[in-house]
Image (spheres, grey):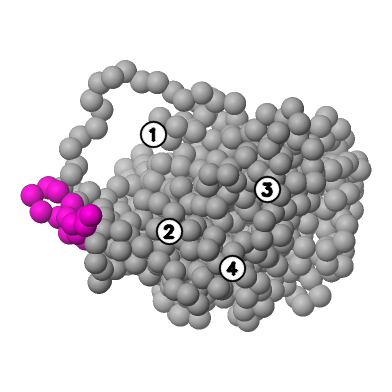
């Protein structure tokens, strides 16, 4: 059985979450987040008081199954249109900085 | 003309009493006068709007016009409209011109309607006050020191101030109903899956739903006829027979069982709101309805469950904003990882980042079961509460919000306090049920009060009937600011 309990958030947690979310966070901002997120998680802890043994998780309001369609081409090539809003492109490719090891 | 209903405008256009160009021009002129104060619109394009109006006039002249041809509508800036800036209230998309139309926009275009402009909204639909928009706060037309509600605050303010005959909104946790309530207009969030989310910028995919915001339930019904329908491009779009949502508007109410959840009339509800809602219920009894006490025992859980599930889905949906293919890219950065993290830190506002952080945490290894999975189980319990309640009643009613519009800045420092104001609307999204808000009076500060009507799945026609008969017997929905 998984027991959920609220371990107080630490600054290290905030920085780890920020990394996972790919959002740069300064030292000051990290402290602000610590305060705000702790408040929100206190609210969320109310969930733990309720027994949900045997309850199936509900992902979706309606019981639907993903539709299938025939494996044929149904889209037209609109790369030009879609790339017209890109920050940087060249020869039909999106340009990004090098990934440095 | 500013107060004309969609039905009245349609008749006037058909009778050639007015042209679409004239009608659109009138609203554009009014927007020019009043929008600087209200900030309801983010993007206007007179040329485009008038060109559409001209095309609509041609359709009207040729006799091949539909009910809503030639009528201008304000579009929430969450709907991609080809060739129009589509910002979602964010710096991240401030420079984004949509290369395609959302399904909803296509429907309006196909009907020959006119796009009056894009309305302001809380950033990425995250907010209940329209204070988080990159493009500035929207003011409540009833009192410009007060919030219009959110996230569809621009649309609500536009309709209330008669800057548009009607508008579209979206609702993930109350974002159509709550601003409708705070601005004294009518709005409906239909059953999840009835309005295609294709081209509707995603916040929380299992909760988001587009819907109409207008001056009456009848107008909402006309718009729903346009907005609903199967769309294979949205994997959650439901394949159902097309409905005419106006078909039952005038059905007599006698015998209607109205469920009143005791949890919605408890502590936290402002006395003046309670009073206006009780008066509305008395009116319904006069119309032949009976009220039934019901309970939605897991109501309190809706807030924590929502503030786990919605941010979780948002963190996933907003991971696409990385400065690579569209939208904002940080002007300076080192390597790719640095580009991502600076782009997202600079492009997103504080509330959006907060919710992404929450979502990332609850989905992360070690916490997924305790938070996300737990919330999904509680979601089922909340949905079951409603199913049980609908065994005893036909519709559920209560206040849409615990108070009338609060002042700008009053809650923006305390996210939890802001979140608590969604208490009556959120559970409806979690269950996927249809919900609407109609004006039912005023609070102690002369600000509007909204009555929420919740129906069972696919009961929109019934709900609109229930609302319409109330609007025939009362005139709250005809009131307008100053």
Instruction: Tell me the crowding category of disc 4: few under 14, some 14 to 19, or many 20 or more residues within 10 angstroms, Cα based.
Output: some
**Which label sits in the foreground, 1 or 4?**
4
Q: Is mark 4 on a helix, strand or loop?
A: helix
User: Overall secondary structure of the magenta stretch?
Assistant: loop
Q: Which residue is under mark 2?
A: A19
Q: What element carries label 2?
A: helix
Q: Position of residue B339 (x, y in %)?
A: 29, 63
Stretch of the chain drawn in magenta: A85-101
Q: Residue at x 67, y 40 (%)?
A: B374
Q: Residue at x 58, y 49 (%)?
A: B362
State left or right for residue A53 relative to residue B431.
right
**N-terminal label among 4 and 2:** 2
Which dot marks residue B38? none
Q: In this view, does B341 lie above or below B443?
A: above
Q: Are marks 3 and 1 on the same chain?
A: yes
**Which label sits in the foreground, 2 or 3?**
2
Q: Does residue B281 belong to the magenta stretch?
A: no
Q: Which quarter of the image is occupied by the C terminus of chain B?
A: bottom right
Q: Look at the numbered discs 4 and 3 and tell me whether their residues touch, using CB distance below 8 Å.
A: no
Q: Distance between the residues labelled 4 and 2?
A: 15 Å
Q: Which residue is under mark 4?
A: A34
Query: Of B480 and B188, which appears nearest the observer?
Result: B188
Q: Are marks 1 and 4 on the same chain?
A: no
Q: Position of residue B420 (x, y in %)?
A: 72, 61
Q: Distance between the residues labelled 2 and 3?
A: 25 Å
**Which label sits in the foreground, 2 or 1?**
2
């Amino acid at each position: 059985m998984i027991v959920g309990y609220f371990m107080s958030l630490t600054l290290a947690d905030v920085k780890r979450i920020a990394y996972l979310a790919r959002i740069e966070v300064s030292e000051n901002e990290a402290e602000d987040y610590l305060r705000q997120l702790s408040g929100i998680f206190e609210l969320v802890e109310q969930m733990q008081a309720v027994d949900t043994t045997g309850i199936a998780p509900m992902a979706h309001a309606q019981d639907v199954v993903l539709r299938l369609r025939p494996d044929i081409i149904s889209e037209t090539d609109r790369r030009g249109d879609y790339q017209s809003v890109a920050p940087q492109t060249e020869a039909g490719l999106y340009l990004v900085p090098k990934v440095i090891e | 003309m500013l107060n004309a209903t969609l039905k009245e405008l349609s008749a006037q256009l058909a009778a050639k009493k007015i042209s679409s160009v004239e009608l659109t021009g009138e609203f554009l002129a009014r927007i020019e006068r009043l929008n600087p104060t209200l900030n309801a619109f983010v993007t206007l394009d007179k040329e485009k709007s008038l060109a559409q109006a001209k095309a609509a006039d041609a359709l009207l002249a040729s006799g091949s016009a539909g009910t809503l041809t030639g009528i201008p509508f304000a579009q929430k800036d969450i709907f991609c409209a080809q060739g129009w800036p589509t910002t979602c209230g964010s710096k991240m998309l401030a420079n984004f011109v949509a290369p395609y139309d959302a399904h909803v926009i296509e429907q309006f275009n196909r009907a020959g309607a006119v796009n009056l402009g894009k309305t302001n909204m809380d950033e990425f639909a995250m907010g209940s006050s329209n204070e988080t928009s990159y493009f500035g706060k929207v003011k409540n037309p009833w009192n410009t020191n007060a919030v219009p509600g959110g996230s569809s605050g621009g649309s609500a303010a536009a309709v209330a101030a008669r800057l548009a005959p009607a508008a579209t909104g979206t609702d993930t946790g109350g974002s159509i109903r709550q601003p409708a309530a705070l601005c004294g207009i009518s709005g409906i969030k239909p059953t999840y899956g009835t309005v295609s989310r294709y081209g509707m910028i995603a916040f929380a995919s299992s909760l988001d739903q587009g819907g109409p915001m207008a001056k009456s339930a009848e107008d909402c019904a006309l718009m729903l006829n346009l907005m609903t329908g199967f769309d294979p491009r949205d994997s959650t779009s439901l394949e159902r027979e097309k409905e005419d949502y106006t078909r039952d508007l005038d059905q007599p109410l006698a015998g209607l069982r109205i469920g009143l959840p005791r949890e919605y009339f408890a502590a936290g509800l402002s006395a003046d709101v309670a009073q206006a809602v009780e008066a509305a219920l008395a009116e319904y009894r006069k119309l032949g309805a009976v009220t039934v006490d019901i309970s939605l025992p897991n109501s309190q859980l809706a807030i924590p469950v929502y503030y786990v599930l919605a941010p979780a889905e948002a963190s996933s949906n907003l991971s696409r904003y990385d400065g690579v293919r569209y939208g904002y890219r940080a002007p300076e950065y080192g390597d790719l990882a640095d580009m991502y993290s600076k782009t997202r830190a600079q492009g997103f506002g504080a509330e959006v980042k907060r919710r992404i952080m929450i979502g990332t945490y609850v989905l992360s290894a070690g916490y997924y079961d305790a938070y996300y999975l737990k919330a999904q189980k509680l979601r089922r319990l909340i949905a079951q509460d409603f199913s049980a309640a609908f065994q005893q009643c036909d519709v559920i009613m209560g206040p849409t919000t615990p108070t009338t519009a609060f002042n700008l800045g009053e809650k923006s420092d305390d996210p939890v306090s802001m979140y608590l104001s969604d208490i009556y609307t959120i559970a409806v999204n979690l269950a996927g049920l249809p919900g609407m808000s109609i004006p039912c009076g005023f609070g102690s500060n002369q600000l509007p009060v909204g009555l929420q009507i919740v129906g069972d799945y696919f009961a929109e026609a019934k709900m609109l009937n229930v609302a319409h008969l109330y609007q025939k017997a009362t005139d709250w929905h005809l009131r307008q600011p100053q």
